[in-house]
Image: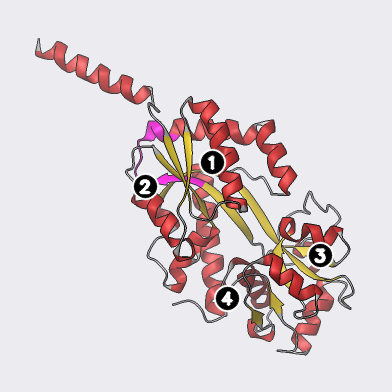
Amino acid sequence: MRKLLLAALLFAASSALAQYPQRPIQLIVPWGAGGGTDATARIIGSLLEKELKQPVNVVNRTGGSGVVGHQAIASSAPDGYTLGLITVEITMMHHVGLTQLRHTDYTPIGLVNADPAGVNVRADSPYKSMKDLLQAIKSNPGKMKASGTGQGGIWHLAIAGLLKDQGIDPNALPWVPSNGAAPGLQDMVAGGVDVVPCSLPEARSMIDAGKVRALAIMDGSPPALYPNLPTLKQELGTNWQIAAWRVIAAPKGIPADAQRTLVTALKKVYDSKEYKDFMASRGFGVVWADPRETAKFMAASDANLGAALKAVGLAK
C-alpha cells in the first residue's frame, strides 16, 4: 500500500512538473513603458503566450537607474512564473556601486536582442572616417565633446573603451551627460557637441534626414540598416565591440524542466516572422544565444564595461 501511495505521489509530482506552466507568468521590465525595452518585452510576451498557452503579463518596475526592476526579478520565487527582460546595465551597475546584483544572479533563458554602438558626427563634420576623428581627438585633447547618455552610461563607455583601446586617454574627449541619445543627437546637430556614440536605431531618423553621418559600427559585421557602414575592424583593425542588449532571464535556481520549456518556447518566438518583422520595423538588432552562450556573452560584457568604467574613473 505504501509503495502504491509513493508511486502515486511521484506520478502526481512528475505530471505537475510536466504540465508547466499551469498559471499566468509575470514578465518584469526594469524600464518605463513606451521605450525600446518595454516594446521588446511586450512583443515577446504576446508571442510567448501562444507558445506556453498561459497569459504573460508585462509589468514595469522602474527606479534606481534600473536597480529596482532588476532586483525584483532576482528576488522573485524561482518557480518559473516570474521572468524578466534584463538589460546591459546589469553588467554595469555593480561596478559603480549602485547594487550588488550581477548577471550571475539570474537563470538565463536566451539573448534576444543586441544593438551595437555606432559612432556619429554631424553631416557637415570635417571628419569623414574613424581615423580622422581619432586623430583629431588625440591631437586636440579636451577640445571636442561627446554626448548621448548619462555619465557612465552604455554609450559613454562605448567611446571611452574605444579610446582606451586605441591608446588615447578617454578624458581627451569630455563627456556631456544627456537624458539619452535623442537629446544628445539634437545637441550635436545644433553644434553643442561633436560626437554621439549610440545605437543606429536611435540615430536612424537623423541619419536618414541627412543631418547626421555615421562613421562606423562597433560590431563584427556591417549593420542591416546600413550595410555599407564599416566596422571598427575594417577601419582601425581593432576587435573592440560593444552593444546595448536584452536577455530574457528568470530568478536563479528555477527548475531545470521549466528552464527547458522556456528556452524552447523563447526560441520559437525568436524564430517567428512576427518577432523578426516587429524588430526590423523598429530597427532593433536580433541576436540569439542559448543559456550557456548567453552566460558567456554577459560575462564578456561585464569585463569590457568594468574596464571602461575604470578607464573613465567611475568604477568603485
Look at mark 4 in the image and give the residue it sits on.
Answer: 151
What residue is at 65 percent from the left and 84 percent from the top? 169
Left or right: residue 98 versus residue 5 is: right
> Can you name the residue that lies furthest to the front here?
33
User: What is the quadrant of residue 281 in the picture?
Assistant: top right
Which kind of residue does numbered mark 1 sit on? Asp
Label 3 secondary element = strand
Of tags 3 and 4, which is closer to the observer?
4
The image position of residue 151, as x and y in percent, is 57, 76
What residue is at 69 percent from the left and 48 percent from the top? 285
Circles 2 and 4: CB atoms closer than 8 Å? no
Look at mark 1 in the image and give the residue it sits on.
Answer: 290
Over which residues does the magenta segment extend?
Answer: 248-259
Q: How far is disc 2 from disc 1 in space, using C-alphas?
A: 16 Å
Look at mark 2 in the image and give the residue it sits on.
Answer: 252
Q: How far is disc 3 from disc 2 in space, using C-alphas?
A: 40 Å
Which kind of residue does numbered mark 3 sit on? Ala
Q: Nearer the viewer, residue 106 or 208?
A: 208
Q: Local crowd at mark 3 within 10 Å, few (<14), some, or many (≥20)?
A: many
Label 1 secondary element = loop
Look at mark 3 in the image and give the residue it sits on.
Answer: 214
Of tags 2 and 4, which is closer to the observer?
4
Tell whether position 255 is magenta.
Answer: yes
